[in-house]
Image: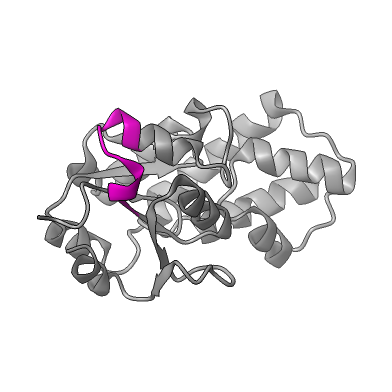
Amino acid sequence: MARFDLVIFDLDGTLVDSERISNRILHRHLAALGVPMTLDEVEAAFIGLSLPSCYRHVADTHGIVIDDATFTPALQAETFACYETELVPMPGVPEALHAIGLPKCVASSSERAKIAFSLQLTGLDRFFGDRIFSGREVPNPKPAPDVFLHAARSLGARPERCALVEDSRFGIAAGVAAGMTVFAYRPHGPIPDSVRRFDDMAELPGFLF
């Protein structure tokens, strides 16, 4: 009997090498608003968060309120354009996905259209089909476990029978809170003792059986 019934993957920084692109563009757009954050500070604060959560952080920390209706479309248009020329899978991801003969899905803080676009650009959509879940579809964003529990429930898997592959501290915390077995891929910062760290996607299939 397989150890897991479902493998849930985060997207950014786990399946696709998008964080360096997204954070570079977000930093530039925030700087244009007068937000005094360095690129390193943007990466440290925002990796794993949804855009609304990032905006709340900026308002709470710097007192600058971001107009979602104007800021987000411009930010996303530039991000999508850069993705078309720069976005690639994380090293070893296609091979690892091919080797994992278990049901798989993607659950991300990004909006659904961005998830689908990223998977299509990198050719990873063939591994997931329509099994994608966005943090925008649930009441609470990471580090709350909502999006992961939503994915498991939608696909008929019990949380304790799910493996979660994540890279961000917020996602890892959400997976632990969901009661899932969490595998941290090149994690940003320290991780709980219950979480298995790994740095090479070639290792992942062997952990799942």
Q: Above or below — where is 114 with respect to 8?
A: above
Please tell me which residue lies in front, 61 or 38.
61
- Left or right side of 168 for 166: left
The colouring scheme, among rainbow, by chain, secondary structure or one colour, is: one colour
Q: Furthest residue to the right?
A: 63
Please tell me which residue lies in front, 32 or 165.
165
In the rendering, at what x and y percent does residue 102 appear? 15, 50
Residue 16 seen in this snapshot = no
- Left or right side of 195 for 6: left
Q: Furthest residue to the top?
A: 69
Residue drawn 39% across and 47% down? 84
Quadrant, the C terminus: bottom left
Q: Quadrant of residue 38?
A: bottom right
Q: Point out the stretch of residues depicted in magenta.
A: 152-163
Residue drawn 58% across and 33% down? 140
Q: Quadrant of residue 207?
A: bottom left
Residue drawn 25% across and 74% down? 203
Please tell me which residue lies in front, 170 or 17.
170
